[in-house]
Image (cartoon, grey):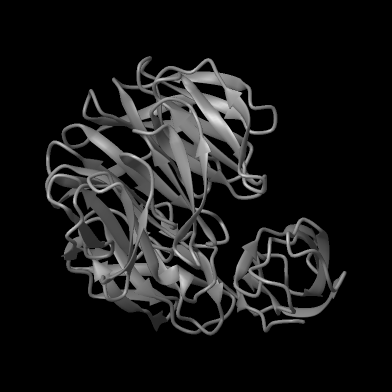
Amino acid sequence: MAAAPALGVLMVPVGHAPKGVAVGPTGRRAYVANSGSGTVSVIDTGSLTVTTAFGPVAAPAAVASVPESVAPGVLDALLYVADSGSDTVTVVDRTSYQTVGSVAVGVDPFAVVVGPNGLRAYVTNSGSDTVSVIDTLTNTVQTTISVGHKPADIAVHPDAFEVYVANQQSDSVSVIDRITDTVTTTITGLSAPTGLAVTPDRTQLYVANGASNSVAVVDTASHAVVATIPVGTRPWGVAIAPDGRRAYVTNNGSDTVSVVDTATRTVVATQAVGRQPTGVTAAPTGLQVIVANSASDTVSVLHVLNAMSPNRGPMTGGTTVTITGTNLAGATRVMFGSVPGTILANTAYQVVAASPPGAGVAQVTITTPGGTSNPKPFFYYPGGDLHGLQPLSGSVTGGNSVTISGDGLDTASRVYFGSIPAVPRMITSEEMEVVAPPAIEAGMVPVSVTTAGGTTAGLA
């Protein structure tokens, strides 16, 4: 049996009847939709304090930020709040927390998600059995798609141009083609599905079956249910850690979170949280899981203990690093080898620090009033360089394969066509392939690559 993760839990008070929760693209802020108080709480994930609450929003059911993959710019500064009380999506600037737009959608919007390139937002309308597709550049509904009865959660496949919709009262998941905005297939054999999450390797979709106390695992290529995992009572939400090793399922009827080992497809831990947990999300580090407790007016923050993320960064320093453990309150120093980092935030279970400049491997330690922690290795990487790409042009709809050559590309995680991201497939440390994403408009854009050593200069 797989080992159960060591978890530490802290509770943060928020507004009344929290339902949906999301983290921002950097993971430094979490956003909680308080459906009973008409506000969205903003939580500093380092200090675990509510820094502000914005509104009014009539009855916020869910909140979404752009994915971490979207390059910094206008789009990554926006939040999208599904307002079930006014049948709208409220668009909010996440710097000023001022409303910058309101988009009329269907009846009783339940969930909202932003596509991987930031250009579309998808909203489930549980009262009208539809999905609204919002153009985020214009904040207008581009199209409305009919799905099953009482659609709940929604998830986007980053590569396969698919959107998945959980239809609670149809016992199914609708699969939408993101190019044609049509339902291409329906996954059946489910039981009041509510929550959805795609694994980071893109091969599986986890579905919370609210009426059968289980999670279904769906193969994203064949759209077939390949496994069913028993969990707690009335599972609601699903989140998957960025490394894909764990799935976290909120059990609304048993006030717990089931921790699922995705390799063995078994529950390896059951963690008590607040009352009637609903929404759940995992931080980009994978070391925090944030759960909305709808009947406790709190969120539970689960910390994966005795870990560090990320464990690598550029030689220039400045990487925000989270280190978890126990008895970390009052940390006075974080050392990267013999060089001190800058402490940015500190709680009993974690220290967040900025790495100093360095080279090679540095052993990271934390000093608290109780002593000094065991070391964890941090790897410094030089930046990469791009030499060429072929072909030099393609359709504005994307989809063509592009080969990129350069040096130091073996840790590449993203390729950007202008501000639009794509996920590369490494061939060697000097060559990669990537499928070009759809463009915002026709014209030339620079291509850059993000590695552990930073982001390269653009190549056009």
Residue 283 image position (x, y, % from top left): 39, 54
Look at the picture and state if 63 lies above or below 354.
Answer: above
Residue 320: quarter of image: bottom left
Residue pictured at 18% horizontal, 61% vertical: 55
Depth check: give the residue in front, 15 or 100. 100
Depth check: give the residue in front, 192 or 372. 192
Residue 224: quarter of image: top right
Look at the picture and state if 361 lies above or below 224.
Answer: below
Residue 415 image position (x, y, % from top left): 67, 67
Residue 423 image position (x, y, % from top left): 67, 58
- Could you tell me if residue 374 is visible in this image? yes
Drawn side of residue 139 relative to residue 359, left or right: left
Q: Residue furthest right?
A: 391
Residue 338 image position (x, y, % from top left): 42, 81
Look at the picture and state if 67 lies above or below 392.
Answer: above
Depth check: give the residue in front, 209 or 440. 440
Look at the picture and state if 363 lies above or below 188.
Answer: below
Residue pictured at 74% horizontal, 62% vertical: 436
Residue pictured at 64% horizontal, 33% vertical: 220
Depth check: give the residue in front, 13 or 440. 440
Residue pictured at 33% horizontal, 26% vertical: 235
The C terminus, quarter of image: bottom right
- Could you tell me if residue 413 is visible in this image? no
